[in-house]
Image: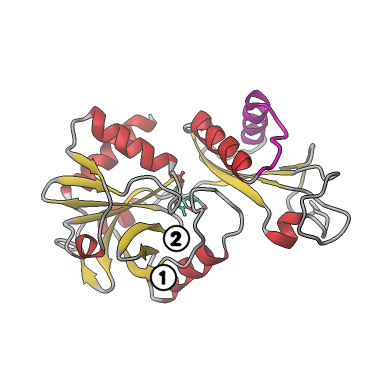
């Protein structure tokens, strides 16, 4: 069952108006909230980012925080699987026609879609994944979790076509993030993370990794990271709500460090898994 504009219904038969601005313009925002053992993970942080995304695109928030929380909990309770990934989307709704100005009459469309969560398997974690570098061709407001993801879709699919899991994005010779993840770098025992800006999404997992680094005394620095530093890194990680903390062990066909997940990755993954419990 999914939630669409006030009704719980089957995902196969749920319908949306063709004039919905999400469909016509990609005019909307979203969240992906992981759920472990039926508990939403970092829910307040996800709802905080949802509110920030709505404000950034001047979309009136249809619900107070408490209602969002109740809707997410109800979505989780309506599904049998214990680990879920709850997709939550708000679009500007349907106007009277296809036109650029925000319609005065439109009601936002709200869609909540829980799916089974599949985090990387033990084998994948032990091996790490491959990635390619790509020019970051996206717009200049990548901090907004907008549903208009065509560039991300193309970039992720270019990685898949190359037999890789992710595209690591570079803008003006500097690391931004992945097509659907944030990227961390380890060099000489120091964890490096690019600073938040309009050029990357403020990842909930990114924040947690830095929180865990602080808590456990992992040497870390938040500062711009250059292409040269990615290419000579001892470790590279991708982080997201669905991938957690996953080592990238091959970049553009070359091994990252030893070509195997490094010790800091294993350590951070252990902190992350313990935090989840
Ligand atoms: N994507 N950067 C981008 C461009 C992303 O799309 C994502 C997540 C992240 C990581 O954010 P978080 O840690 O909050 O999941 C960074 C989600 C999972 C998606 O679009 O499916």
Mark 1 lies on a secondary structure that is helix
- Specify whether 30 is left or right of 235: right
Q: Which residue is mark 1?
A: 159
150 up-or-down from 212: above or below: below
Residue at the outermost front position: 101
- Asked if one can make out residue 249 in the rendered structure from this viewpoint, the answer is yes
Q: Main secondary structure of the magenta part?
A: helix
Image coordinates of residue 191 in percent, x first then y, are: 21, 45
Question: What residue sits right under mark 2 in the picture?
Answer: 179
Picture residue at 34% right of the left edge, 69% below the top:
132
Circle 1 residues within 10 Å: few <14, some 14–19, many ≥20: many
Relative to 148, is 218 on the left or the right? Answer: left
Q: In the orientation shown, which residue stands out farthest toward the right?
A: 96
**Where is residue 207 shown, x and y percent of the image?**
37, 38
- Evaluate whether residue 40 shows in this view: no
> From the viewer's perspective, is residue 127 above or below residue 276?
below
Magenta range: 58-77
């Amino acid at each position: 069952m999914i939630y669409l504009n006030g009704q719980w219904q089957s995902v196969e038969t749920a319908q949306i108006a063709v004039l919905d601005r999400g469909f016509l313009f990609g005019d909307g925002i979203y969240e992906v909230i992981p759920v472990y053992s039926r508990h939403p993970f970092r829910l307040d942080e996800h709802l905080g980012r949802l509110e920030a995304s709505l404000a950034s695109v001047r979309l009136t928030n249809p619900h107070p925080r408490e209602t969002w929380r109740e809707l997410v909990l109800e979505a989780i309770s309506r599904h049998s699987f214990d680990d879920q990934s709850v997709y939550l989307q708000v679009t500007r709704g349907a106007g009277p026609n296809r036109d650029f100005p925000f319609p005065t009459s439109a009601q936002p469309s709200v869609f909540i879609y829980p799916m089974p969560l599949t985090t990387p398997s033990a084998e994948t974690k032990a091996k790490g994944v491959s990635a390619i570098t790509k020019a970051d061709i996206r717009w200049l407001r990548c901090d907004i979790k907008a549903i208009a993801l065509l560039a991300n879709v193309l970039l992720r699919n270019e990685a898949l076509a190359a037999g890789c899991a992710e595209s690591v994005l570079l803008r003006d010779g500097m690391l931004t993030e992945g097509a659907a993840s944030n990227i961390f770098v380890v060099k000489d025992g120091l964890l490096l993370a690019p600073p938040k800006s309009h050029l990357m999404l403020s990842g909930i997992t990114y924040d947690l990794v830095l929180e865990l680094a602080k808590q456990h005394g992992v040497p870390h620095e938040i500062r711009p990271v250059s292409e040269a530093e990615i290419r000579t890194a001892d470790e590279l990680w991708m982080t997201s709500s669905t991938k957690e903390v996953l080592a990238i062990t091959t970049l553009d066909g070359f091994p990252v460090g030893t070509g195997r997940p490094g010790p800091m990755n294993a350590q951070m993954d252990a902190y992350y898994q313990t935090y989840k419990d």
